[in-house]
Amino acid sequence: MSSLLPQLPATLFVDADGQPRLVGRVILVTGATGGLGQLVCRTAAAAGATVLLLARQEKRLNLLYDALRDGGAAEPMVVTLDLSAQSDAQFEALAQAVASQLGRLDAVFHAASQFVQLAPLALQTLKDWERAIAVNLLAPFALTRACLPLLRAAPTARAVFCAEAHALAPTAFWGGFAASQAALPGLVRMLAQEHDDHPDLRVHLLIPGAVDTPMRERTHPGETRAQRRPVAELAPLILNLLGAAALPGDTGGTGGTAGAAGTADTAAAAPMIPASGSIVRA
Ligand SMILES: NC(=O)c1ccc[n+]([C@@H]2O[C@H](COP(=O)([O-])OP(=O)(O)OC[C@H]3O[C@@H](n4cnc5c(N)ncnc54)[C@H](OP(=O)(O)O)[C@@H]3O)[C@@H](O)[C@H]2O)c1
């Protein structure tokens, strides 16, 4: 299945015994059609997982579905959903559909993102902020909450949230975009602490850094492509974040910040992820 990411070595996706690293795992990916989301879907599928593809635009979802099927992936499930217009009941219905159709859920990867044009606060509107907060904060919280019974039942569960670095240190002009992601470190910490008695549920906030995706072009218009890494370089890190295996240096416990170490250039260089609730900088 390395044809899903032909630029990467096929050995990346299998363990020492030659088994696909994520075989048997069911992984829900929001923002599946975006730059990071597609990478997560292709990586997880290439490593044997069954992937649930969630985004708004059906046509793009179907193209990704076809690409995964043509690449030999396990039958993906497509979920066409606008995350900005959901209720607890709708997220619970989605979790129930996953339970009845696939029987389990091992990980949720939140890569959906609503951008707010960088501008002085004086020029940003309530609607801009509402849309960003709905997609970037409320939906990741509410979808994870609805999936918790399934995640708690999984032998080794993962919840991965994503943010731009300004979520940790907002500065002028980042406005509603940074503000909507700024609560995610707290959400990750709370969720991890509330599962201290459930160490097999790991919660991470991923800060991908300068990778080449459409979102990066909007957030950093002055940057050239040469200043960004190809998004595929994150694949080893994604496998570590979503996998069931214990990681080197993995001692469990809540509230770590893994990171700076990570260049994620190769499997060998992938950052270690030492805590059950951590911020991971790629
Ligand atoms: N690229 C980078 O360098 C970089 C750096 C740091 C952090 N990040 C973070 O990584 C995450 C993903 O970034 P990206 O570059 O992959 O973004 P992207 O390419 O713009 O993709 C965004 C995805 O979200 C989906 N989406 C947007 N609004 C939605 C809604 N209302 N309901 C459902 N789906 C929705 C989009 O699909 P539809 O339009 O079909 O819905 C698309 O699949 C973001 O949190 C971003 O801040 C990226």
Image (tube, rainbow, N blue to C red):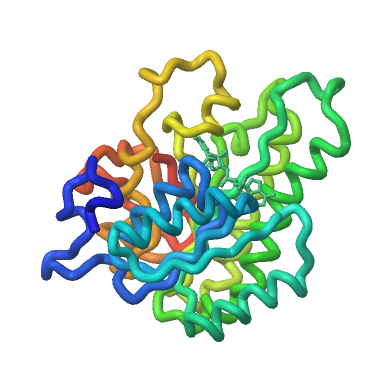
Height in image: 202 above or below 268? below
Q: Quadrant of the N terminus?
A: bottom left
Judged from this view, the residue extending furthest toward the left is: 17
* Observer able to see residue 66: yes
Residue at x 78%, y 66% (from the top left corner): 87
Residue at x 18%, y 64% (from the top left corner): 15
- The quadrant holding residue 106 is bottom left
Height in image: 206 above or below 29? above
Height in image: 53 above or below 216? below
Nearer to the camera, 40 or 136: 40
Percent position of residue 127, x then y = 85, 38
Residue at x 59%, y 81% (from the top left corner): 149
Percent position of residue 62, x then y = 51, 56
Q: Quadrant of the C terminus?
A: top left
Nearer to the camera, 180 or 280: 180
Q: Is residue 193 left or right of residue 50?
A: right
Q: Is residue 158 left or right of residue 84?
A: left
Residue at x 70%, y 23% (from the top left corner): 118
Percent position of residue 233, x then y = 31, 39
